[in-house]
Amino acid sequence: MAPAVGIIANPVSARDIRRVVANAANLQIADRANIVLRVLAALRSCGITDVVMMPEHGGIGRHVARGLARAAAHGDAPYPAVHRLSMPVTGTVADTHRAAAEMRRADVGAIVVLGGDGTHRAVAAHCGAVPIAGISTGTNNAFPEHREATVTGLAVGLAVTGCVPAAVAFAANKRIDVAIDGGVEDMALVDVALVTERCVGARALWKPESFRELFVTFADPEVIGMSAIAGLLEPVGRTESGGLMVRLAAPQGAATVLTAPIAPGLMARVGVTDWRRMPAGVPFVPEVKAGSIALDGEREITVSVRNRVSLTLQDAAFLTVNVGGCMRHAAQNRLLASVPAPAMAEH
Protein backbone atom coordinates (compact mmCIF):
# COMPACT_ATOMS: atom_id res chain seq x y z
CA MET A 1 0.00 0.00 0.00
CA ALA A 2 1.35 3.45 -0.92
CA PRO A 3 2.20 5.72 2.02
CA ALA A 4 0.22 8.89 2.67
CA VAL A 5 1.60 12.25 1.58
CA GLY A 6 1.37 15.40 3.71
CA ILE A 7 0.48 18.85 2.39
CA ILE A 8 1.21 22.08 4.28
CA ALA A 9 -0.19 25.12 2.46
CA ASN A 10 0.49 28.47 4.12
CA PRO A 11 -2.52 30.77 3.52
CA VAL A 12 -0.63 33.92 4.54
CA SER A 13 2.76 33.57 2.83
CA ALA A 14 3.78 36.51 0.62
CA ARG A 15 2.04 39.13 2.78
CA ASP A 16 4.96 40.98 4.36
CA ILE A 17 6.08 44.60 3.93
CA ARG A 18 7.80 43.73 0.64
CA ARG A 19 4.29 43.69 -0.87
CA VAL A 20 4.39 47.48 -0.44
CA VAL A 21 8.00 48.35 -1.32
CA ALA A 22 8.34 45.95 -4.27
CA ASN A 23 6.19 44.60 -7.08
CA ALA A 24 5.92 41.02 -5.90
CA ALA A 25 3.00 38.80 -6.80
CA ASN A 26 0.39 37.78 -4.25
CA LEU A 27 -1.39 34.48 -4.86
CA GLN A 28 -5.04 34.52 -3.89
CA ILE A 29 -6.50 31.74 -1.75
CA ALA A 30 -8.31 30.21 -4.75
CA ASP A 31 -4.99 30.08 -6.64
CA ARG A 32 -3.32 28.27 -3.74
CA ALA A 33 -6.21 25.80 -3.58
CA ASN A 34 -5.91 25.16 -7.31
CA ILE A 35 -2.21 24.40 -6.83
CA VAL A 36 -3.16 21.84 -4.17
CA LEU A 37 -5.73 20.27 -6.52
CA ARG A 38 -3.10 19.94 -9.25
CA VAL A 39 -0.75 18.24 -6.80
CA LEU A 40 -3.54 15.90 -5.67
CA ALA A 41 -4.34 14.86 -9.24
CA ALA A 42 -0.70 14.08 -9.93
CA LEU A 43 -0.35 12.10 -6.69
CA ARG A 44 -3.43 10.01 -7.48
CA SER A 45 -2.07 9.16 -10.93
CA CYS A 46 0.93 7.60 -9.17
CA GLY A 47 -1.21 5.47 -6.87
CA ILE A 48 -1.37 7.71 -3.78
CA THR A 49 -4.77 7.16 -2.16
CA ASP A 50 -4.45 9.23 1.04
CA VAL A 51 -3.25 12.74 1.76
CA VAL A 52 -2.96 14.44 5.15
CA MET A 53 -3.42 18.23 5.07
CA MET A 54 -2.74 20.97 7.59
CA PRO A 55 -5.97 22.73 8.69
CA GLU A 56 -6.11 26.54 8.41
CA HIS A 57 -8.69 29.31 8.57
CA GLY A 58 -7.56 31.08 5.39
CA GLY A 59 -9.92 29.18 3.11
CA ILE A 60 -7.56 26.89 1.18
CA GLY A 61 -9.14 23.78 2.66
CA ARG A 62 -12.66 24.95 1.83
CA HIS A 63 -11.75 25.60 -1.81
CA VAL A 64 -10.05 22.22 -2.06
CA ALA A 65 -13.10 20.50 -0.56
CA ARG A 66 -15.34 22.15 -3.17
CA GLY A 67 -13.02 20.93 -5.95
CA LEU A 68 -13.17 17.39 -4.59
CA ALA A 69 -16.97 17.59 -4.31
CA ARG A 70 -17.31 18.84 -7.91
CA ALA A 71 -15.22 15.93 -9.18
CA ALA A 72 -17.28 13.42 -7.19
CA ALA A 73 -20.55 14.92 -8.48
CA HIS A 74 -19.37 14.37 -12.05
CA GLY A 75 -18.45 10.77 -11.29
CA ASP A 76 -14.72 11.46 -11.52
CA ALA A 77 -12.18 10.08 -9.09
CA PRO A 78 -8.96 11.90 -9.95
CA TYR A 79 -7.98 12.73 -6.38
CA PRO A 80 -6.80 10.90 -3.24
CA ALA A 81 -8.84 11.07 -0.05
CA VAL A 82 -7.88 14.21 1.88
CA HIS A 83 -7.74 14.04 5.70
CA ARG A 84 -7.36 17.19 7.79
CA LEU A 85 -5.08 16.91 10.79
CA SER A 86 -6.93 17.10 14.10
CA MET A 87 -5.16 20.06 15.70
CA PRO A 88 -5.97 23.57 16.93
CA VAL A 89 -5.47 26.41 14.44
CA THR A 90 -3.73 29.53 15.77
CA GLY A 91 -3.04 31.33 12.50
CA THR A 92 0.67 31.53 13.40
CA VAL A 93 3.82 29.66 12.42
CA ALA A 94 3.06 27.30 15.31
CA ASP A 95 0.47 25.64 13.05
CA THR A 96 3.18 24.75 10.52
CA HIS A 97 5.49 23.48 13.26
CA ARG A 98 2.80 21.26 14.74
CA ALA A 99 1.55 19.99 11.36
CA ALA A 100 5.07 19.00 10.28
CA ALA A 101 5.65 17.18 13.56
CA GLU A 102 2.27 15.40 13.33
CA MET A 103 3.00 14.31 9.77
CA ARG A 104 6.40 13.02 10.83
CA ARG A 105 4.79 10.96 13.59
CA ALA A 106 2.21 9.68 11.07
CA ASP A 107 5.11 8.41 8.93
CA VAL A 108 4.03 10.15 5.72
CA GLY A 109 6.24 9.46 2.71
CA ALA A 110 6.88 13.16 1.99
CA ILE A 111 5.48 16.63 2.76
CA VAL A 112 4.51 19.00 -0.06
CA VAL A 113 4.98 22.61 1.11
CA LEU A 114 3.31 25.71 -0.38
CA GLY A 115 5.02 28.86 0.83
CA GLY A 116 8.18 30.93 0.74
CA ASP A 117 11.54 30.47 2.42
CA GLY A 118 10.09 31.05 5.90
CA THR A 119 7.40 28.39 5.53
CA HIS A 120 9.90 25.83 4.26
CA ARG A 121 12.21 26.64 7.17
CA ALA A 122 9.36 26.07 9.62
CA VAL A 123 8.61 22.66 8.08
CA ALA A 124 12.26 21.60 7.88
CA ALA A 125 12.68 22.39 11.59
CA HIS A 126 10.10 19.75 12.56
CA CYS A 127 9.84 17.18 9.76
CA GLY A 128 12.80 15.07 10.86
CA ALA A 129 13.79 12.53 8.20
CA VAL A 130 10.62 13.05 6.12
CA PRO A 131 11.56 14.57 2.72
CA ILE A 132 9.88 17.82 1.70
CA ALA A 133 8.90 19.05 -1.77
CA GLY A 134 8.69 22.81 -2.15
CA ILE A 135 6.28 24.89 -4.22
CA SER A 136 6.96 28.64 -4.41
CA THR A 137 4.09 30.79 -3.11
CA GLY A 138 5.99 33.28 -0.94
CA THR A 139 7.73 36.62 -1.46
CA ASN A 140 11.35 35.51 -1.59
CA ASN A 141 11.44 31.95 -2.91
CA ALA A 142 15.16 31.14 -2.95
CA PHE A 143 14.78 27.70 -1.40
CA PRO A 144 11.77 26.22 -3.24
CA GLU A 145 12.57 25.79 -6.91
CA HIS A 146 10.15 27.37 -9.41
CA ARG A 147 8.26 24.58 -11.15
CA GLU A 148 4.70 23.69 -12.15
CA ALA A 149 2.95 22.07 -9.19
CA THR A 150 1.68 19.16 -11.29
CA VAL A 151 5.25 18.08 -12.03
CA THR A 152 6.18 18.39 -8.35
CA GLY A 153 3.20 16.20 -7.45
CA LEU A 154 4.22 13.58 -10.02
CA ALA A 155 7.77 13.48 -8.69
CA VAL A 156 6.55 13.09 -5.10
CA GLY A 157 4.22 10.27 -6.10
CA LEU A 158 6.95 8.44 -8.00
CA ALA A 159 9.40 8.91 -5.13
CA VAL A 160 7.26 7.78 -2.20
CA THR A 161 5.83 4.75 -4.04
CA GLY A 162 9.36 3.49 -4.71
CA CYS A 163 9.14 3.79 -8.51
CA VAL A 164 12.29 5.89 -8.35
CA PRO A 165 15.23 4.57 -6.27
CA ALA A 166 15.79 6.53 -3.07
CA ALA A 167 19.33 7.43 -4.14
CA VAL A 168 17.81 9.31 -7.08
CA ALA A 169 14.50 10.38 -5.54
CA PHE A 170 15.84 12.28 -2.54
CA ALA A 171 18.55 14.91 -2.13
CA ALA A 172 20.40 16.11 0.97
CA ASN A 173 20.20 19.82 1.85
CA LYS A 174 22.23 22.20 3.98
CA ARG A 175 21.23 24.49 6.84
CA ILE A 176 22.92 27.03 9.13
CA ASP A 177 22.48 26.56 12.89
CA VAL A 178 22.41 29.75 14.95
CA ALA A 179 23.75 29.31 18.50
CA ILE A 180 23.41 31.99 21.15
CA ASP A 181 25.28 31.72 24.43
CA GLY A 182 26.16 28.10 23.68
CA GLY A 183 22.68 26.80 22.81
CA VAL A 184 21.18 26.32 19.35
CA GLU A 185 18.52 29.01 19.01
CA ASP A 186 17.26 28.57 15.44
CA MET A 187 18.35 27.71 11.92
CA ALA A 188 18.13 28.92 8.32
CA LEU A 189 17.81 27.02 5.05
CA VAL A 190 19.22 29.73 2.75
CA ASP A 191 20.75 32.69 4.58
CA VAL A 192 21.52 34.30 7.90
CA ALA A 193 21.97 38.08 7.85
CA LEU A 194 23.28 40.29 10.66
CA VAL A 195 21.72 43.78 10.56
CA THR A 196 22.25 46.82 12.74
CA GLU A 197 18.55 47.39 13.45
CA ARG A 198 17.77 46.21 16.99
CA CYS A 199 14.00 46.13 16.56
CA VAL A 200 12.51 43.11 14.78
CA GLY A 201 9.61 45.32 13.63
CA ALA A 202 8.12 44.31 10.28
CA ARG A 203 10.67 41.45 10.17
CA ALA A 204 11.25 41.37 6.41
CA LEU A 205 14.62 42.66 5.18
CA TRP A 206 14.44 45.50 2.65
CA LYS A 207 16.80 48.27 3.92
CA PRO A 208 20.29 47.44 2.59
CA GLU A 209 21.95 50.24 4.57
CA SER A 210 21.50 48.13 7.71
CA PHE A 211 23.09 44.94 6.27
CA ARG A 212 26.46 44.04 7.81
CA GLU A 213 27.17 40.29 7.50
CA LEU A 214 25.68 37.51 5.42
CA PHE A 215 26.07 33.73 5.64
CA VAL A 216 24.50 31.50 2.98
CA THR A 217 24.11 27.76 2.42
CA PHE A 218 24.13 28.31 -1.34
CA ALA A 219 24.82 31.35 -3.49
CA ASP A 220 22.68 31.49 -6.61
CA PRO A 221 22.72 34.50 -8.96
CA GLU A 222 19.31 33.45 -10.32
CA VAL A 223 17.37 33.81 -7.05
CA ILE A 224 15.80 36.76 -5.24
CA GLY A 225 16.84 37.85 -1.75
CA MET A 226 19.99 37.94 0.34
CA SER A 227 21.38 34.82 -1.32
CA ALA A 228 21.44 36.76 -4.60
CA ILE A 229 24.09 39.09 -3.13
CA ALA A 230 26.39 36.14 -2.45
CA GLY A 231 25.52 34.52 -5.77
CA LEU A 232 26.64 37.60 -7.70
CA LEU A 233 30.01 37.44 -5.93
CA GLU A 234 30.86 33.72 -5.96
CA PRO A 235 28.22 31.11 -6.85
CA VAL A 236 27.98 28.09 -4.54
CA GLY A 237 25.70 25.19 -5.54
CA ARG A 238 23.02 23.56 -3.45
CA THR A 239 24.82 20.21 -3.58
CA GLU A 240 28.31 21.58 -2.83
CA SER A 241 29.69 21.21 0.67
CA GLY A 242 29.75 24.44 2.64
CA GLY A 243 28.53 27.93 1.80
CA LEU A 244 29.73 31.54 1.69
CA MET A 245 30.25 34.39 4.15
CA VAL A 246 30.02 38.04 2.99
CA ARG A 247 30.85 41.21 4.93
CA LEU A 248 28.73 44.18 3.91
CA ALA A 249 28.92 47.94 4.31
CA ALA A 250 27.39 51.16 3.07
CA PRO A 251 28.08 51.56 -0.67
CA GLN A 252 29.97 54.80 -0.09
CA GLY A 253 33.63 53.86 0.22
CA ALA A 254 33.09 50.08 -0.09
CA ALA A 255 35.65 48.15 -2.13
CA THR A 256 32.91 46.48 -4.16
CA VAL A 257 29.39 47.71 -4.87
CA LEU A 258 26.74 45.30 -6.16
CA THR A 259 23.33 45.95 -7.62
CA ALA A 260 21.28 42.99 -6.42
CA PRO A 261 17.59 41.95 -6.46
CA ILE A 262 16.88 41.70 -2.73
CA ALA A 263 13.11 41.35 -3.30
CA PRO A 264 10.93 40.98 -6.40
CA GLY A 265 11.34 44.18 -8.40
CA LEU A 266 13.50 45.75 -5.68
CA MET A 267 17.06 46.43 -6.83
CA ALA A 268 19.50 47.64 -4.19
CA ARG A 269 23.09 48.90 -4.19
CA VAL A 270 25.00 46.91 -1.60
CA GLY A 271 28.57 47.57 -0.49
CA VAL A 272 30.87 44.56 0.01
CA THR A 273 34.16 44.62 1.93
CA ASP A 274 35.08 40.93 1.96
CA TRP A 275 33.83 37.41 1.28
CA ARG A 276 35.09 33.89 1.83
CA ARG A 277 33.98 30.26 1.79
CA MET A 278 32.11 28.89 4.82
CA PRO A 279 33.18 25.26 5.33
CA ALA A 280 30.68 22.82 6.85
CA GLY A 281 31.03 22.10 10.56
CA VAL A 282 33.18 25.17 11.33
CA PRO A 283 31.62 27.71 13.73
CA PHE A 284 31.74 31.32 12.51
CA VAL A 285 31.53 34.21 14.99
CA PRO A 286 29.94 37.35 13.46
CA GLU A 287 31.71 40.68 13.88
CA VAL A 288 28.40 42.46 14.54
CA LYS A 289 27.92 42.45 18.30
CA ALA A 290 24.45 44.00 18.59
CA GLY A 291 21.44 44.19 16.30
CA SER A 292 19.12 41.63 14.76
CA ILE A 293 19.62 38.24 13.15
CA ALA A 294 17.49 37.62 10.06
CA LEU A 295 16.80 34.03 9.05
CA ASP A 296 15.86 33.41 5.41
CA GLY A 297 15.01 37.08 4.89
CA GLU A 298 13.10 37.81 8.12
CA ARG A 299 14.41 39.34 11.34
CA GLU A 300 13.81 36.78 14.08
CA ILE A 301 16.33 37.33 16.89
CA THR A 302 17.61 40.44 18.68
CA VAL A 303 21.11 40.24 20.16
CA SER A 304 23.17 42.55 22.39
CA VAL A 305 26.88 42.85 23.18
CA ARG A 306 26.30 40.46 26.09
CA ASN A 307 25.33 37.59 23.77
CA ARG A 308 27.78 35.09 22.26
CA VAL A 309 26.65 34.23 18.73
CA SER A 310 28.07 31.53 16.47
CA LEU A 311 26.88 30.16 13.12
CA THR A 312 27.64 26.66 11.86
CA LEU A 313 26.71 25.28 8.44
CA GLN A 314 25.60 21.64 8.41
CA ASP A 315 25.78 19.50 5.28
CA ALA A 316 23.12 16.79 4.72
CA ALA A 317 20.82 18.30 7.38
CA PHE A 318 17.47 17.27 5.87
CA LEU A 319 15.99 15.74 2.70
CA THR A 320 14.01 17.09 -0.22
CA VAL A 321 12.39 15.32 -3.14
CA ASN A 322 14.70 15.59 -6.15
CA VAL A 323 11.99 16.56 -8.62
CA GLY A 324 14.29 16.86 -11.62
CA GLY A 325 15.99 13.57 -10.85
CA CYS A 326 12.66 11.78 -10.42
CA MET A 327 11.28 13.03 -13.71
CA ARG A 328 14.47 12.22 -15.65
CA HIS A 329 14.43 8.70 -14.19
CA ALA A 330 10.76 8.35 -15.12
CA ALA A 331 11.49 9.42 -18.69
CA GLN A 332 14.56 7.22 -19.11
CA ASN A 333 12.71 4.18 -17.78
CA ARG A 334 9.32 4.96 -19.38
CA LEU A 335 7.62 4.83 -15.97
CA LEU A 336 4.66 6.85 -17.24
CA ALA A 337 4.55 5.23 -20.70
CA SER A 338 2.78 2.08 -21.89
CA VAL A 339 5.89 0.83 -23.68
CA PRO A 340 9.10 -0.30 -21.95
CA ALA A 341 12.35 1.59 -22.14
CA PRO A 342 14.65 0.40 -24.91
CA ALA A 343 17.25 -2.15 -23.86
CA MET A 344 20.83 -0.93 -23.74
CA ALA A 345 22.83 -2.08 -26.75
CA GLU A 346 25.53 -4.62 -26.01
CA HIS A 347 29.11 -3.73 -26.83
Image: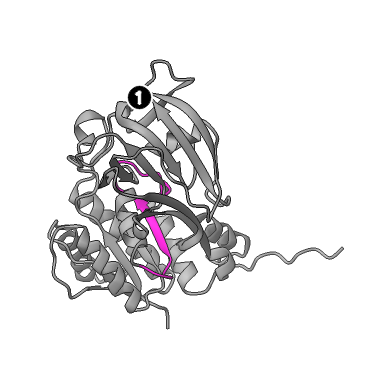
Q: Residue at x 19, y 46 (%)?
A: 28
Q: In which quadrant of the rendered view does residue 210 lie?
A: top left
Q: Residue at x 43, y 45 (%)?
A: 285
Judge left or right: residue 256 versus residue 127.
right
Q: In which quadrant of the rendered view does residue 128 lie?
A: bottom left
Q: Is residue 185 above or below residue 85?
A: above
Residues packed near mark 1 inside 10 Å, few (<14), some (14 to 19) or many (20 plus): some
Residue 117 at x, y = what percent?
34, 49
Q: Residue at x 17, y 57 (%)?
A: 92
Question: Given the image, on which type of amino acid does mark 1 rest?
Answer: Ala
Residue 136 at x, y = what percent?
34, 48
- Please tell me which residue lies in front, 75 or 241: 241
- Give the residues in magenta: 127-146
- Please tell me which residue lies in front, 66 or 50: 50
Judge left or right: residue 222 versus residue 277.
left
Asked which secondary structure carries label 1, the reply is: strand
Specify whether residue 224 is in view.
no
Q: Residue at x 40, y 78 (%)?
A: 3
Q: Residue furthest bottom?
A: 1
Residue 306 at x, y = what percent?
29, 47
Q: Residue furthest top?
A: 253
Residue 278 at x, y = what percent?
53, 45
Q: Is residue 106 magenta?
A: no
Q: Which residue is mark 1?
A: 268
Judge left or right: residue 143 versus residue 73.
right
- Please tell me which residue lies in front, 167 or 209: 209
